[in-house]
Amino acid sequence: MDSKVLLDLKNVNKVFGNNHVLKNINLQIERGKFITFLGPSGCGKTTLLRSIAGFYSVDEGEVWIDGKLVNDLPPYKRGTPMVFQEYALFPHMTVFDNIAYGLDIKKTPEAEVQQRVEGAMAQVKLTGLEERYPHEMSGGQQQRVAMARALVMNSPIILLDEPLSNLDAKLREEVRVELRTIQQDLGLTVIYVTHDQLEALSMSDQIVVFNKGAIDQYGTPHEIYYEPRTQYVADFIGTTNFTEAIVVHSEGGKVTVRYGQVGDTITIASDEKFVDGEEVLLSVRPESLRLNQPEFGEFNVTGIIKSSMFLGEKERYFLVDEVGKEWIVDAYDIGQKTFEGIVPMNATADKVHIIKKVN
């Protein structure tokens, strides 16, 4: 196995009763990366995380960690400490004892326990709180204790199952930055489960988007957002505008399509394979469109503004085109100016993404 790859999942399947929860999962995760499993509730992301940790046994396939097949190993022998949504701290133990728990189970020498616990506490900014109990701490501090308990094991990989979901919005943002900083400073491999798109986009080196037990796309945040491979990914991540088109010609990584009522054409770069005459979808993000700038880009649609919404840093416009399709356009830093009536919407070709249509 490639030494860069720390986790290798091969054809992993998991079934609960009649529910096929994980469907042929194949995934390789490199060392030192922050990887996020993203998807709605029930899509399989937490089941896969627990299968990696050993809390679930897979029904088919192989789980390799650091070049070792671990299918038959119990959780405590896999080296995959997990931070749970509820933190799972022992209420009768001090912070120090909670963090030291895994080391104590392994009968680590007392001097080494002291050194490693102190080091982990310093990494998550808990120094001086050794004798406190969980109920005496804030949610953010409890989250740090759970993180330190994972860090202290010196494991090559750490698993986090929606660890910020119980925190308020401001604290979530602060702890999110702390987690990413710790991961980068220590060169950790982290797998993070969330349904929060902003969390995934802001923290991750790469994102795995789950759809009904299967992986729809695995890529960088930029690729996931601007180059979605499926309609599901484009629709799930943020907001987008879809419009139908027909492939006119496809060759050498360039696809020319016809779209709109008047049959305008645009050529888009794509590594997907398309055939002439194929029906496809075009995806354009609201912030990629410009209003009333007809010379701005190669993609052109005309719409009537129906309403707008002031959102502080931007004005969000809701339009309807000549065939009755609704569009959303975000205009930034326009001051007091508000668009009205019939206006052109334009985008550059590199911000228009072509997606295969699923019938």
Image (cartoon, grey):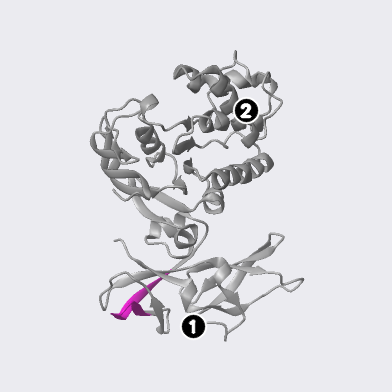
Callout 1: 10 Å neighbours few (<14), some, many (20+)? Answer: some
Q: Earlier in the sequence, mark 1 or mark 2?
A: 2
Residue name at image x 47 percent, y 47 percent:
32
Where residue 313 appears, as percent x and y from the top left, is 70, 62
Callout 2: 10 Å neighbours few (<14), some, many (20+)? Answer: many
- Please name the residue that numbered disc 1 is placed on: 298
Q: What residue type is labelled 1?
A: Glu
Q: What residue type is labelled 2?
A: Glu
Q: Is residue 269 left or right of residue 273?
A: right
Q: In this view, does 6 lie to the left or right of 129?
A: left
From the image, which quarter does the C terminus lie in? bottom left
In the figure, 160 relative to 243: above or below? above
Task: Write down the quadrant of residue 256 in the picture.
Answer: bottom left
Q: Which of 139 and 20 is in front in this view?
A: 139
Magenta residues (range): 243-257
Where residue 88 appears, as percent x and y from the top left, is 53, 23
Instruction: Quote the CA–CA distance across marks 1 and 2.
Output: 59 Å
Q: Residue 118 bears which disc, if any?
A: 2
In the figure, 257 relative to 192: above or below? below
Q: Which of 282 and 83 is in front in this view?
A: 83
- Of badges 1 and 2, the one in the foreground is 2
Q: Does the magenta stretch include residue 248?
A: yes
Where residue 97 appears, as percent x and y from the top left, is 58, 18
